[in-house]
Image (cartoon, grey):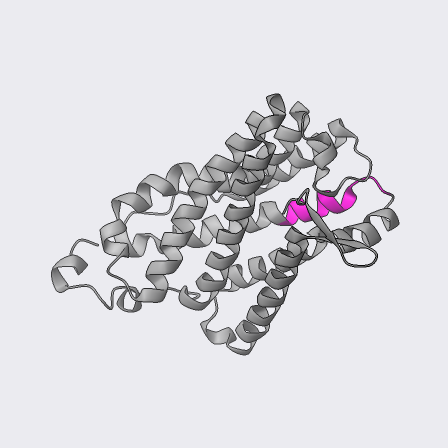
């Protein structure tokens, strides 16, 4: 989660407007994780791991936390590397959980290449390579390097599992949207928000590419990225509540007619 260039000083150190939103998200994710542990029998384990990973990612994005931890790690942006590795895993796992669910609607087999472990490993290697090329000093979100090609590679690697998922899932979910809209309310809202979030990933990546050559697009990019991050956070909270460990056709199609069920 990137920093805002407009900040409000609350004594020392400084908290930005984005930090305040991050603190709220951390609190909500923490409460959700505790609640899901209590109701572990009904919780998708993969999505719960993503919940915990994003709790750490968003927590470390807070300027106060970064300012305390990054110097301890040598001031070489290793904290950025760690949090982006968690983001890669989170994107891969969210895509995996969603592709496991969609056959309940269209009957198609899961596309193995989208969630193959090699996608996860290659993305992590590419991320480490881009950090090595940038050779950054302490910079929260690497904002100080956002006009360099390696910075774009850094975000391509981070978002690659989600980008790969978006290319496949956006058109696939659009085709079955009439069926999605006939599920129970929680499932319907979760899947619709995830669909919009994947569109936001495409726009965010385009924003990073444009900013590399035109810095005047920075504010627009940050609005898109922040909105996409917020949408994914909300989607994740809803997904842990509405997508079970092993989705059952009956629960997902509770609001469908017999004729609609025959389409699955």
Q: Is residue 138 visible?
A: yes
Segment tinted magenta in the rendering: 75-86
Q: Is residue 232 left or right of residue 86?
A: left
Q: Residue at x 60, y 23 (%)?
A: 214
Task: Please state which of residues 202 and 120 is positioned toward the viewer in this rendering.
Answer: 202
Q: Is residue 78 magenta?
A: yes
- Residue lying at the far bottom of the rendered structure: 38
| Rendered image quadrant of residue 255 | bottom left
Above or below residue 172? Residue 25 is below
Above or below residue 81? Residue 63 is below
Q: Is residue 104 left or right of residue 86?
A: left
Rendering coords of residue 197 (x, y %)? 45, 47
Task: Please state which of residues 201 and 91 is positioned toward the viewer in this rendering.
Answer: 201
Above or below residue 208? Residue 181 is below
Q: Is residue 114 visible?
A: no
Q: Is residue 10 left or right of residue 190?
A: right
Disc tally is 0
**Quadrant assignment for the C terminus:** bottom left
Majority secondary structure of the magenta segment? helix
| Rendered image quadrant of residue 259 | bottom left
Q: Residue at x 58, y 69 (%)?
A: 33
- Residue lying at the far top of the rendered structure: 213
Rendering coords of residue 29 (x, y %)? 58, 65
Rendering coords of residue 30 (x, y %)? 62, 68
Q: Is residue 40 left or right of residue 166?
A: right
Rendering coords of residue 61 (x, y %)? 69, 51
Q: Residue at x 55, y 39 (%)?
A: 159
């Amino acid at each position: 989660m990137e920093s805002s260039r407009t900040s409000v000083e609350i004594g020392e150190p400084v908290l930005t407007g984005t930090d305040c939103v991050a603190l709220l998200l951390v609190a909500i994710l923490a409460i959700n994780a505790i609640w899901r542990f209590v109701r572990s029998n009904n919780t998708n384990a993969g999505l719960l791991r993503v919940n915990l990973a994003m709790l750490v990612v968003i927590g470390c994005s807070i300027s106060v936390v970064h300012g305390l931890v990054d110097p301890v790690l040598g001031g070489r942006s290793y904290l950025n590397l760690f949090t982006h590795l968690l983001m890669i895993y989170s994107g891969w796992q969210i895509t995996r959980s969603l592709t496991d669910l969609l056959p309940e609607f269209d009957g198609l087999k899961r596309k193995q290449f989208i969630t193959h472990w090699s996608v996860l490993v290659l993305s992590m290697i590419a991320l480490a390579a881009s950090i090595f090329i940038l050779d950054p000093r302490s910079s929260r979100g690497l904002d100080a390097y956002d006009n360099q090609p390696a910075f774009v590679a850094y975000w391509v690697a981070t978002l690659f599992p989600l980008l790969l998922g978006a290319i496949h899932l956006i058109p696939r979910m659009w085709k079955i949207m009439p069926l999605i809209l006939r599920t129970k309310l929680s499932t319907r809202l979760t899947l619709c928000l995830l669909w919009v979030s994947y569109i936001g990933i495409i726009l965010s990546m385009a924003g990073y590419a444009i900013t590399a050559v035109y810095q005047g697009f920075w504010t627009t990019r940050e609005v898109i990225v922040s909105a996409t991050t917020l949408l994914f956070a909300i989607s994740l909270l809803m997904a842990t509540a509405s997508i079970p460990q092993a989705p059952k056709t009956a629960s997902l199609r509770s609001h469908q007619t017999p004729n609609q069920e025959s389409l699955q």
